[in-house]
Image: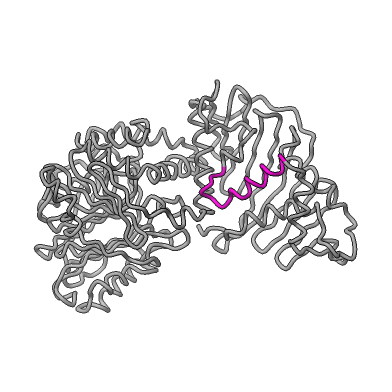
Amino acid sequence: MRHLPRRTPAILLFMLLLPLSVAPGTAQEPRWDPVAAAKPLLQALSGTAQQFQVSGSISFTIDDHSQNVEFRVVRFDDESFDVELTHEDYAIAMRRRADATALALPKHGVVYVGTGPVTTQDRLSCRGMWQRLISSDSELSTVAFAFSFLSAADPEAFVVSVLDQAGFQYNAKTDKLETDEATLASDGAGHLHVTSNEFTLESLTTLTVPQPTDVLEWPAYKQESLPRDELETTLVRGVRRAGEILQPALSLRKPDESTRNVPHGRLTWKNGQRIATLWGTPEEIGTAHGQLLKMEASRCIDSVLYTFGTAHVIRTGKWFRQDLDDAYARLQSHIPERHQRETRAMARALGLPQRQAEILNVFPELFHCSGFAVFDSATVDGKLYHGRVLDYMTTIGLQDAATTFIVRPKDQIAFANVGYAGFIGSVSGMNARGISLGEMGGRGEGDWDGVPMATLMRRALEECETLPEVMELWENSPRTCEYYYVFADGKSNDAVGVAATPEKIEFIRPGEGHELLGAGITDAVVLSAGSRLEELRRRVQEKHGAIDSDIGMWLMSRPVAMESNLHNVLFVPADGILYVANAGHNKPAAEMPYVRIDLRAMLKTDQLQALKTTGGD
């Protein structure tokens, strides 16, 4: 989904408040009273009205598809409100009272109800809600500031001073206030009609409200009970993180790139990318991870558990946290104890409940990607080049937590893991023995009686020195869901494609044809799907014999990479080199610069050399 332009929230705010002022020099006055039309909404936004009702619709376009959302908001008092949102694909209805909160999903016939007091700071009470819903790391914070200012100042005087600079003029023929980008009209007190290049808004605001419906009255709905703190925290943090994703402030677009050092860890930057170096025991690595990346891990958690979690419940009717808890209960016994110790140590360093960190780490079970390995006659120098495209949900903002980890675990093989703060598993990695791995998600969500994919990937990086050892690990491990992989070994110049389900596993050797992948290509393994597979095959064949690192990165460019392309990696395992590109806020990874990372050089830094006795080589 494409983001709305960054100016949208500011334009929307000013359009809503516009009727309080007509630009100086307007020759004629509107036949409708702008102040009377906007006054109820202004009182609602400024907080001076204790009760109000706003209803209407907003229409906009995303990816050439027209979208329309009907809305209704009723505020009864500081603790009580109703919200209804209806779209052709989804709908929510929410009631909050002093003693209970209910979230209903009309298209699924289910309502989640939490009762009792709210102890969390992330609560949905009306007073101060803008400050809890809008983060200072979002450009929407200017809107929250404006609303706060309106409640403390003379709202009409404030809007007049702002809109004196706006340049709106009255058009007597249309009876509208207009600029080149927007128009505003009203057909009576409280009615507003706004049209801009980006959206159309119709609303009616009144200061009289109906009698509140009982928060527990949901005839014909299946009722599910939730802890009220969990229900409200999920919605508040989900919306707040969504604001950061859709309208990131400068603090996210250009983060602080200062180096950080903690015992057993170091965070550095290279051309805008985070590189976290960790070493030691599981407890030492987990603690250093949490200490170095506390803010980034928090964003990752909010993106996954709360923003994605809120979207998930609206889309499916299922409470996301419950699904993850159920998955983790079945997966936990297949996770190595050393990984569980590392996760628990990270949770303590982050100040998180242990369970929260644990379920976050079984999240990536639905990735959709592409990959290839080419070598010998396919490359200009005979070296093996392994490309890995991760296409997955740039819209939930994981790029704000993107981190390449250089990890030297005690008594295990050192490795590079291209991942995300707060997540210890691997979806793209290469170890110091020249083994590289990438995966592609398939079907079978819910087949969770096995080793989590990301755990199996990390085990291969830590434990395997040859390609046959990687293949044996997969053959002998209980597996989850349906996944496809490319495994490569830079020492032997060999690679293999893998199709794995819980029931069976199939290895596709270089040059072999496959019904899902097409005819074999000499000295190549190519993995993708649909038109992306066709394009990747065409490119590999076109450049066969001339592929080097530059062409290897080109092979992963659009449209082989999807618009949701979260990261791309080109491994050159024989040299211990990886090239990493992470998605930006408005561009997929394939359109962002690659950063060259030398795993061997990173492992030989003075700091790690001085601590050589902590393990690895």
Q: Is residue 55 above or below residue 175?
A: above
Q: Nearer the viewer, residue 5 or 195?
A: 5
Can you see residue 527? Answer: no
User: The magenta stretch spans which residues?
Assistant: 134-152
Q: Is 523 above or below relative to 357?
A: below
Residue at 58%, 33% (x, y): give it.
Answer: 124
Residue 440 in magenta stretch: no
Q: Position of residue 255 (x, y in %)?
A: 43, 54
Which quadrant of the view contains residue 600? bottom left
Residue 9 shows up from this direction: yes
Task: Measuring from the top left, give residue 160's x and y in whole percent.
Answer: 78, 53
The front one of 51 and 222 is: 51
Looking at the rendered structure, the number of numbered marks drawn on it comes to: 0
In x, y percent, where is residue 203? 74, 48
**Residue 86 versus residue 545: which sits nearer the camera?**
545
| Colour pattern of the rendering | one colour
The percent coordinates of residue 603 (x first, y second) are: 17, 54
Magenta stretch encompasses residue 149: yes
